[in-house]
Amino acid sequence: MRGAARLLIFASFVGQVLHAAPVEPPTLLGSAGFQPSAQHPFGWRGDGSGCFPGAAPVTEWSPVQNVKWSAATGRSYSSPILADRFVVVTAEPNLVVCLQRKDGALAWSLTVTPAALADQKSRDAAERYELPKDGSGMAAATPVTDGKTIFTVFANGIVCAIGLDGKQKWAACI
C-alpha cells in the first residue's frame, strides 16, 4: 500500500508538471511592472546585464535644476551611503555626518577621536598618524552599513561602529 501511495503521489506530481501553464517571461527590470521574485530577483545590477531597460535617469543638473535638496557636510572624498531613512557620509578630519534622506536636514554628527579607543597604545598610534601625502585626507574611505549599524574607517586606523541613532557602539584601531 505504501509503495502504491508513493507512486500515485509521484504520478500526480508528474502530471501537474507536464500540464503546467507555460512560464511567461518576467517584466524587465527597471520597467514599471517589475516585481522581484525567487526566479527573477532584484540584486546587484538587477538581472546581471548591467542595464535597466525602460529607465529614464536624470542626465542634466545644476545647483537648482533636478536637485531635491543639498546640504553642506564638509570636505571629503568618501561617497554618501543610504541607511534606512538617512544619508551618511564622512568629512574631514574625523566627522561622520548623518542627514535625513527626505529633506537633507542634519539628523546627527559624530566626531571620532583617539579618545574613543579603549587602550592607551591604540590612542597613541592614532594620534601619531601623519596625513596622507596625496591630499586625500583622513576621511576618504566610504562608510558601509548592514542597515542597523554604520561602520567607518579613518586613515589613522580608527574603525568605528555607530548606531542609526548616532551613538557610537565601539571603536578600535587597526
Image (cartoon, rainbow, N blue to C red):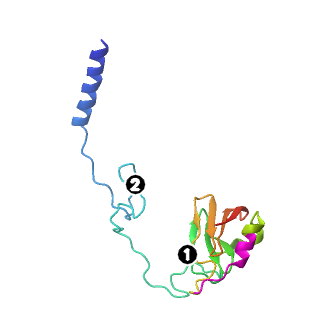
Closer to us: 90 or 103:
90
Report whether residue 111 is seen: no
Up/down of 148 relative to 73, above or below = above
Q: Secondary structure at mark 1?
A: loop
Q: Residues within 10 Å of mark 2 (few under 14, many from 20)?
A: few
**Label 2 is placed on what type of residue?**
Pro
Q: Which residue is mark 2?
A: 41
Of the two numbered discs 2 and 1 on the same chain, state the one appearing first in sequence.
2
Could you tell me which residue is drawn at 54 percent across and 81 percent down? 67
Query: Where does the C terminus fall, quadrant-wise?
Result: bottom right
Q: Quadrant of residue 163?
A: bottom right
**Label 1 is placed on what type of residue?**
Ser
Asked whether, in this view, residue 138 is left or right of residue 120, the answer is left
Closer to us: 161 or 28:
161
Could you tell me which residue is drawn at 66 percent across and 82 percent down? 130
Numbered marks: total: 2
Query: Where does the N terminus fall, quadrant-wise?
Result: top left
Magenta residues (range): 123-133
Q: Quadrant of residue 125?
A: bottom right
> x, y (%) of residue 157?
64, 71
Up/down of 64 relative to 94, above or below = below
Camera-near label (2 vs 1) is 1
User: Can residue 72 be found in the magenta stretch?
Assistant: no
Q: Which mark is residue 79?
A: 1
**Residue farthest to the front, as pictured:** 121
> x, y (%) of residue 143?
59, 69
Up/down of 66 relative to 157, above or below = below
